Image: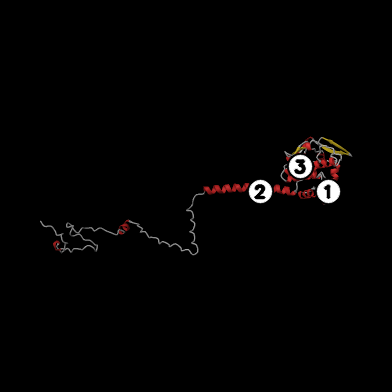
């Protein structure tokens, strides 16, 4: 069975072969040899991109036999990609040119409606397709494979591209999915490794998402243990003058009642100069004059206008 690179190399070497569309459909869509040889243009809808398998054209000895598909599930619809549709359109124009050339040259042409025909318009013999394929493989220098092996390769490559077994069963026309799994899908080691990696990645991603949710929830529920750290001030650019630092102003701290009393800058005197009713009052402040006890009250020098009253 060929790899994808070997199949691409083969298709590139037979690009100008009259049966290029047959090799393409066998290698990419997995059609049987009898289904390809029995295909008619009425079975293909190029606008919708689908072809229908309605008959099987095979050989018994030297006799060609055409009948129903191999199994009831073989009667099916096969989807066509855009590239396959383009290839079939080119092949149809090629068949129309061959017909016009035969009519112009007076050669016989039988309009049978088959997709793959001989020079006279009749359908090709299935054995001719087998012989022609072997010749082309030898010319391309590729490992020898059978024409039916292209069907095996198409199934395996489709599975490698992501198609599941049910899709492959419908594509190949198998009556049982067991046949598809056991016979036509020889899964390559790299496919199994890719499947294992994808499964492990799925679980690891789920675990990462769970841990992230737990961390986010714990961060929200965590109490605030202190002021948030303030970012340090930005350093001035080179050449710029640094702003002058202001000296902190010391504020007086008053800790007790006695200290608060001493902090008062202005203290009112305990006696007034005009107070004559308490002559013996003494004061310890320097701003007040202490009066001796032996000195009479009228001997004191009083300011003008403050003489004592006499009755």
The dot on residue 136 is 1
Give 99 or 16, whichever is nearer the viewer.
99
Using the numbered discs, state the Cα–Cα distance from disc 1 to disc 2 in whole angstroms.
44 Å
x and y percentages locating residue 255 in the rendered image? 35, 57
Q: Which mark is residue 89?
A: 3
Secondary element under disc 2, as helix, strand or loop, is helix
Task: Give the mark nearest the N terminus, 1 or 3.
Answer: 3
Residue 5 image point, x, y percent: 76, 50
Q: Position of residue 10 (x, y in %)?
A: 79, 49
Residue at 57%, 47% (x, y): give it. 214
Residue 214 seen in the figure? yes
The reply to whether residue 183 is in sight is no
Q: Which mark is residue 201?
A: 2
Q: Say if mark 1 contacts mark 3, CB within 8 Å.
A: no
Left or right: 204 as drawn, with respect to 250: right
Pointer 1 and pointer 2: residues touching (CB < 8 Å)?
Answer: no
Foreground pick, 89 / 257: 89
Q: Nearer the viewer, mark 3 or mark 2?
A: 3
């Amino acid at each position: 069975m060929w790899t994808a690179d070997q199949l691409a190399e083969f298709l590139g070497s037979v690009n100008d072969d009259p049966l290029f569309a047959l090799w393409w459909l066998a290698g990419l869509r997995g059609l049987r040899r009898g289904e390809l040889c029995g295909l008619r243009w009425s079975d293909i809808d190029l606008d919708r991109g689908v072809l229908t398998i309605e008959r099987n054209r095979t050989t018994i000895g030297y006799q060609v036999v055409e009948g129903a598909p191999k199994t009831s599930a073989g009667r099916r619809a096969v989807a066509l990609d855009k590239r396959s549709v383009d290839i079939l359109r080119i092949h149809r124009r090629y068949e129309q040119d061959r017909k016009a050339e035969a009519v112009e040259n007076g050669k016989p042409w039988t309009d049978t409606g088959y997709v793959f025909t001989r020079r006279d318009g009749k359908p090709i013999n299935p054995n001719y397709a087998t012989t022609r394929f072997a010749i082309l493989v030898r010319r391309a220098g590729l490992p020898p494979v059978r024409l039916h092996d292209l069907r095996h390769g198409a199934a395996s490559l489709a599975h490698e591209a992501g198609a599941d077994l049910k899709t492959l069963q419908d594509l190949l026309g198998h009556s049982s999915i067991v046949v598809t799994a056991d016979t036509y899908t020889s899964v390559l080691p790299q496919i199994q490794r890719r499947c294992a990696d994808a499964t492990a990645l799925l679980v690891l991603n789920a675990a990462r998402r769970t841990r992230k949710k737990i961390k986010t929830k714990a961060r929200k529920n965590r109490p605030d243990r202190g002021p948030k750290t303030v970012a340090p001030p930005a350093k001035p650019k080179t050449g710029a003058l640094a702003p002058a630092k202001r000296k902190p102003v010391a504020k007086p701290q008053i800790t007790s009642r006695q200290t608060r009393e001493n902090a008062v800058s202005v203290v009112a005197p305990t006696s007034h100069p005009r107070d004559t009713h308490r002559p013996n009052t003494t004061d310890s402040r320097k701003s007040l004059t202490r009066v001796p006890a032996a000195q009479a009250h009228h001997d004191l020098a009083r300011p003008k206008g403050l003489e004592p009253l006499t009755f």
